[in-house]
Image: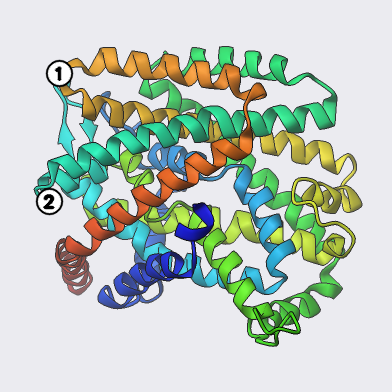
Amino acid sequence: MNEIVWGPPTVIFILLVGVFFTVRLRFFQILNIKLWLRDTFGTLIGNNSSKNCDKNSISPFQAIATSIGGCVGTGNIIGIAGAVITGGPGALFWMWVACFFSMMTAFAENVLSIKFRRKDEKGRYYGGPMVYMEDGLKKKQLGLVFSVICALGSLINGGFIQTNAMCVNIKNSFNISGWATALITTILVAIIIFGGTKRIVSVTEKIVPFMAITYLAIGLIIFAANFSKLGSVIASIIKEAFNFKSISTGGVGSVALIAMNRGTLRGLFSSEAGLGTAPIIHSTSSNEDPVKQGAWGIFQVFISGFIVCSVTGFSILLTGVNDVCKDSGIITAMAFDKFIPFGKFFLCVILILFAFSTIMGCAFQGEKVTQYIFKTKRKKSATIYKIFTLISILLSAFINVEAAWGICDLSNLFMMITNLMALLMLSKTVVFCTRSYLKKEQEKSIV
């Protein structure tokens, strides 16, 4: 079923939504790069904590750290490796294309998440696709169905899939049994998630920068060691991206088409732009301006899609391990091991951090949508969801991970299609907010 529903028509539709917002917003990610860099990178200089937010909200940095934690998982390493193996070097080019356009999809859903967010009985912000579906589109039932699917998907992705990936990698690297890893992870997650939203974001704002900087540093070492090959690798990426020569005598497919499919799909999934999960986190930010929080959506795609995924892809291509290994689970570790002492162990630690941060992000998202579903029993429903999260983590070492991935992919499809349709129908609101923001900025510059 996944092979059918995640075919070219679906991928093209998702990509075209990004193209639509890019055109409607006049290539905002390029022509207004100074503005969104100022509102993201600029605010991090000397101030990346929660000092400027009250007890009922989280800082924009905490929001982006938690959302990046939720989308930067094992797929950014193993998934990209699989795309390069099956799609060839050209897959990286089409991944960049997908990321470029999905920047504006992420921007649009963040703008709407702030525009239509609400406050609960304790004065805490909450929002996301379910809220702008109800308040913006007046489709309450659609918002409820989205929330149910999101709760299920977050439970499977965060609890089962990411923990299972941790169990497998730790067993392969340190020979520690899967059930022991699952038990320890369950205890750690319980301590964090039962400490409330503030504790979750406090953990992610420390883990995410560390794991991203560490992964980038290792990538730069591999770049430096293989700098002489960089030109030829970039040339092969571009060449293979447009190589429409048939790969079979029957002319069934071509190098470029396979690269386009694998790269585009991985680019769309690497940042979760359009999926609707990240806006749930962004809606809790202390940021009052929809467009300024929208800029963090662009930043999210830049980090998770362009930076993290590119490091994985270039590490594989520069070291040439894709010519001798076709196993996406170990190929990146082989690349690291060629130039970094104990490289595979470093990668194992990074994978653990990636997976753990995703568990935190999914727990956050799942808790919020569960509270939306059970408005009158918010506290009780959140507690029950946390218990289910811990159970899924504990059982993760014993599940059929392929079946879990299958269910997760189907839930992602439903969330993404419904969210993208909502974004298109509310596009006038996104355009109005953006143009109002740009007008104010223009007036400031004149003054």
Image location (x, y in percent) of residue 270: 53, 54
Quadrant holding the C terminus: bottom left
How many other residues sit within 10 Å of disc 1, few (<14), some (14-19) or many (≥20)?
few
Instruction: Please give the name of the residue rendered at 43% of the width and 34% of the height, measured from the top-left corner.
Output: 154
Q: Given the image, on which type of amino acid does mark 2 rest?
A: Gly
Say whether residue 205 is visible.
Answer: no
Depth check, front residue: 321 or 347: 321
Instruction: Please give the name of the residue rendered at 23% of the width and 34% of the height, measured from the top-left corner.
Output: 126
Is 83 positioned to the left or the right of 413 in the image?
A: right
Depth check, front residue: 99 or 169: 169
Q: Is residue 298 above or below residue 118?
A: below
Mark number displayed over residue 136: 2
Say whether residue 248 is visible.
Answer: yes
Instruction: Please give the name of the residue rendered at 40% of the width and 53% of the height, measured from the top-left corner.
Output: 40
Q: Given the image, on which type of amino acid does mark 1 rest?
A: Thr
Q: Is residue 219 above or below residue 124?
A: below
Secondary structure beneath label 1: helix
Q: Is residue 182 above or below residue 368?
A: above
The first of marks 2 and 1 along the sequence is 2
How many other residues sit within 10 Å of disc 2, few (<14), some (14-19) or many (≥20)?
some
Model colouring: rainbow
Image location (x, y in percent) of residue 279: 32, 45
Mark number displayed over residue 392: none
Secondary structure beneath label 2: loop
Is 427 positioned to the left or the right of 170 in the image?
A: left
The residues tagged by marks 2 and 1 sit, at their Cα atoms, a distance apart of 22 Å
Instruction: Please give the name of the residue rendered at 81% of the width and 66% of the height, measured from the top-left corner.
Output: 318
* Residue under label 1: 376
